[in-house]
Amino acid sequence: MRATYLYGAGDVRIESVPDPIIQQPTDAIVRVTRACICGSDLHPFHSAPPTERGKAMGHEYIGVVEEIGGEVSTLKAGDFVIAPFTYQDNTCVFCREGMQTSCPRGGYYGAHGVGGGQAEAIRVPQADGSLVKVPGAVDEALYPSLLTLSDVYLTGYHAAHQGRVAPGKTVTVIGDGAVGLSAVLASKRLGAERIILMGRHAARTDLGVDFGATDVVAARAEEGVAAVLELTGGEGSHVVIEAVGLMPAYEQAYGIVRPGGVISRVGVPQYNRAPVGWNALFGKNVTLTGGPAPVRAYIEAALPDVLEGRIEPGRVFDRTVSIDEVPAGYRAMDDRSALKVLVQP
Amino acid sequence: MRATYLYGAGDVRIESVPDPIIQQPTDAIVRVTRACICGSDLHPFHSAPPTERGKAMGHEYIGVVEEIGGEVSTLKAGDFVIAPFTYQDNTCVFCREGMQTSCPRGGYYGAHGVGGGQAEAIRVPQADGSLVKVPGAVDEALYPSLLTLSDVYLTGYHAAHQGRVAPGKTVTVIGDGAVGLSAVLASKRLGAERIILMGRHAARTDLGVDFGATDVVAARAEEGVAAVLELTGGEGSHVVIEAVGLMPAYEQAYGIVRPGGVISRVGVPQYNRAPVGWNALFGKNVTLTGGPAPVRAYIEAALPDVLEGRIEPGRVFDRTVSIDEVPAGYRAMDDRSALKVLVQP
């Protein structure tokens, strides 16, 4: 089969490799119907050191079960499935608490002998816990939105959920990438009264407005903070969703959050230390939350919203590539000519 | 009257000054019945630069209203009152949201022309919003516990409340000072299943056990983290209350918090930047919360617990001094020969 590997910064290659096979009785093999490129894939694309052995890429995919191991009990060949961007047993104490990204038997794709989703097929560990079957016949028009339940929409949802978005609240989303726009859509779905989107790319913020943003702020840094404070009568935002992962976004977040408010981060932080003292967080009782989204916890509840057309998160995809065009897809997302790239193997 | 001033590190003086008078129609004058020394008073006691004009000290007191300004409508001379450690109007949008410590018309004692509570009397700004009347005749035996509603017990309560302590949860409290012990008592009151107290002073941790701690861990740093992880079957603590304010306590906190758990800080952080990246907080979806406690939001609910004897948070006081002995009280708290010092003017 054809699959995607990263050999260092900027060096994405598509290679022919043996088809995956069952290794553990809890495995399944899935033929990938659609995959995509994640904003987080761009971090190693920017900075990974060169390696002789490439790293398998991709962690978002939907597909059809081809084969199951002897201990897989909830799936069968032919099932159409959504794969959360981590695998997990979905039975351990952390999974039962909705923290599937911390499952001790779980993990991330592209490591520890597990391949990536930007491929024609993939071996899925802990298949019973990891794959969610979509019931009935699946309309191809829904593929993009179903694929977002693998990561991007539900990562935005996680941000809103952890931020305790609710009716009557003002939410500010920092970042007009696909996760930020997903957070807008999720905040709308959770009933936010006002959604301020901070972003500078009109095509993206326009989609944000379609998704429910009530205000768009293009200014950044101190000017951006001042603009949001003005929009909120000087009070600040109940919830700030930080969907970038860089320090300037963090600094913006604590500038605009309301006393007693929440900063919810879902952009993987590209920094370790940050201001958390009296002036940044403590003095105004700001809560800082977020992390890798346990999307497995949210898929069942979101699925009817997609299947019945109440939300269309798949609109974040603005380009489709074949497997062999995946390297071009990385470049397009990197130079921002594409918002999010769908892969059709 | 006699009142307490700090002229620099280690330099606490008791001085004779004019009695306070009404300055604003929203003021009240309160004759102080009991005050106390706060762990947070020790920070300037350690490090304040020398000044020619002393800073008025003390922010925890109970007392009797002596005089009210023309616009004060809910109090009268003779009322027995508890004063939250900040003043606030209790009507603004932040106060209504339970964030009285962020009231734009509120503030901290000992600044902006407002005196301190370690004195025989005090002018209280925004008296209607700031003072809570205790109904009926007040038994002197209850004075210590009522005084803790001014700050220390309800600061511990705030930590537990922000940490979402609830039945079934494991709470670890870092710090066996008066706030830490109060957090133990509040966690017990909120139904925590297990309360692990990290502290090294047996007399204090013994009181913590009386307050509801189920386990005591004397070890610190990596050893302390390992001990708590062992006690929790390797899973970590749902809630970690950080009642110290120093970086080693913060580092301990993220070492022992459970995936998806909460670190709730009420020790005023003596650092600005701290680890918040993948390994510290983000990777396991840890929530960081806390800040100066809006005790005004909690007093009414806690008052019956004290008046009816369900809790006795005043047990944190282990020494009583007169106003003239306040400097000795600071030294006793500083050298840890006293846990918390009550002031009887």
Image (cartoon, coloured by chain):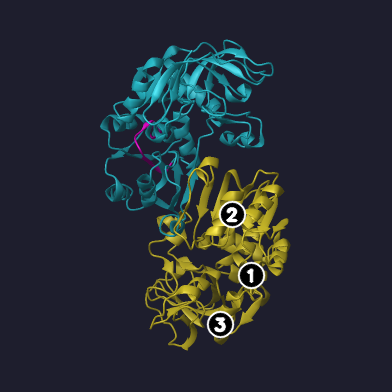
Chain colours: A cyan, B yellow
Residue A204 image-quadrant placement: top left
Q: Position of residue A197 (x, y in %)?
A: 34, 38
The answer to the question of whether label 3 and label 1 lie on touching residues, with beta carbons closer than 8 A, is: no
What is the chain identity of the residue bearing mark 2?
Answer: B
What is the chain identity of the residue bearing mark 3?
Answer: B
Which residue is the site of mark 3?
B326
Disc assigned to residue A184: none
Counting residues from the N terminus, which is met first, the one under dot 1 or under dot 2? Answer: 1
Residue at 48% across, 56% down: B98
Residues indicated by labels 3 and 1 sit on the same polypeptide chain = yes
Counting residues from the N terminus, which is met first, the one under dot 2 or under dot 3? Answer: 2
Disc assigned to residue B252: 2
Q: Amino acid at mark 2?
A: Gln
Question: Looking at the image, which residue sits at the far bottom?
Answer: B16
Magenta stretch encompasses residue A163: no
Q: Amino acid at mark 1?
A: Ser
What is the chain identity of the residue bearing mark 1?
Answer: B
Counting residues from the N terminus, which is met first, the one under dot 3 or under dot 1? Answer: 1
* C-alpha gap between disc 2 and disc 3: 34 Å
Tag 1, which secondary structure? Answer: helix
Residue at 37% across, 34% down: A46
Which stretch did the figure color magenta? A168-181
Q: Position of residue B191 (x, y in %)?
A: 68, 51
Residue at 34% across, 28% down: A333
Image quadrant where one finds the C terminus of chain A: top left
Q: Position of residue B132 (x, y in %)?
A: 53, 67
